[in-house]
Image: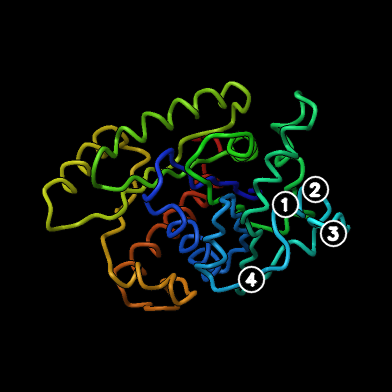
Amino acid sequence: MGMRKIAVAMAKGGVGKTTTAVNLAHGLALAGKRVLLVDCDTQAQTTTFLGVSPPHGLYEFITGRDGNGKTVLKKEAIFPARQNLWVLAGGIQLVELKHWLGEQPRDQRHAVLRHSLTPKNNGLDYLIFDCAPGWDVLSVNILMAVQEVLCPVALQGPAVEGLKTFFGYLISVQQLNQSLRLKYILPTMFDRRTRQSRDIYNQLRRLFRKQICSPIYHNVRLCEAPGNGKSIFEYDNNATGAKDYRKLAERLIDDAIRRQDHPGLF
């Protein structure tokens, strides 16, 4: 089976997207998988969470030049963040990237990422995109480039409303990218003390029997780790958050094995 391309995406902010993208990517890397994590947000949180400062990122990777017009090779833009884990940084230059994408020919602009992010010789196992909550030419590019979507859903507030909005986006892109699938619904910020968390979780389980993942419980250590530039596995490998994200990584790996055994099922 080739490289899996997964977007960690949701229409709503503050649901744990970057926490999920970073800890899932590192969890897979720790399991021996080769992972490229792509930060598609202008806030550049992915690199902050990992405590790294790459000189280049996604803008240079796609356009082939830096802000001063100097040529940058693709391999120079990909930054080794951990063993088995590479990062393509986001940041404010993604505003420029969106302008650049908007200037491409109409019939090509939505497929730029899909054509650019094709590693040689199956060099990667996973390509994971940490998506921004908005909807623009870059968001469409990401959903055109992936086959699987993982939606973190915070178990608080109008959680399901954010999902409905996101479904609208997905359905519009699926007409262009027919291999795109909503593969995982990840309940996040599960607070055992509140009835609301339990109610939303049960609602999601009823609606998404196949896609639902084991929840990520509210965990102080998970909130502290990014401020230290560490994944949860480095910050506190025994924390609930580490156990929860390890379980998520294992689910993705198990799904890949099942797919190889039964190629006709998916």
Residue where numbered disc 2 is placed: 63
Nearest the viewer among 125 and 135 is 135
**Of marks 2 and 3, the one in the foreground:** 2
Question: Is residue 179 shown above or below 27?
Answer: above
Q: Residue at x 31, y 57 (%)?
A: 216
Which kind of residue does numbered mark 4 sit on? Ser
Q: Is residue 244 left or right of residue 130?
A: left
Disc nearer the start of the sequence (2/3): 2
Q: CA distance from mark 4 to mark 2?
A: 20 Å
Q: Give the secondary structure at mark 2.
A: helix
Residue where numbered disc 3 is placed: 73
Q: CA distance from mark 3 to mark 4?
A: 18 Å
Q: Give the secondary structure at mark 4.
A: loop
The dot on residue 53 is 4
Question: Is residue 137 shown above or below 251?
Answer: above
- Could you classify mark 2 by the number of other residues whose Cα lies within 10 Å: few (under 14), some (14-19), or many (20 or more)? some
Q: Residue at x 70, y 59 (%)?
A: 57
- Pointer 3 with pointer 4, Cβ within 8 A: no
Which kind of residue does numbered mark 1 sit on? Tyr
Task: Locate residue 234, reporting x and y percent.
Answer: 45, 78
Question: Is residue 168 shown above or below 10?
Answer: above
Q: How many labels, in total?
A: 4
- Pointer 2 with pointer 1, Cβ within 8 A: yes
Extreme-front residue of the structure:
68
Residue where numbered disc 1 is placed: 59
Q: Residue at x 37, y 78 (%)?
A: 236
Q: Residue at x 42, y 43 (%)?
A: 151
Disc nearer the start of the sequence (3/4): 4
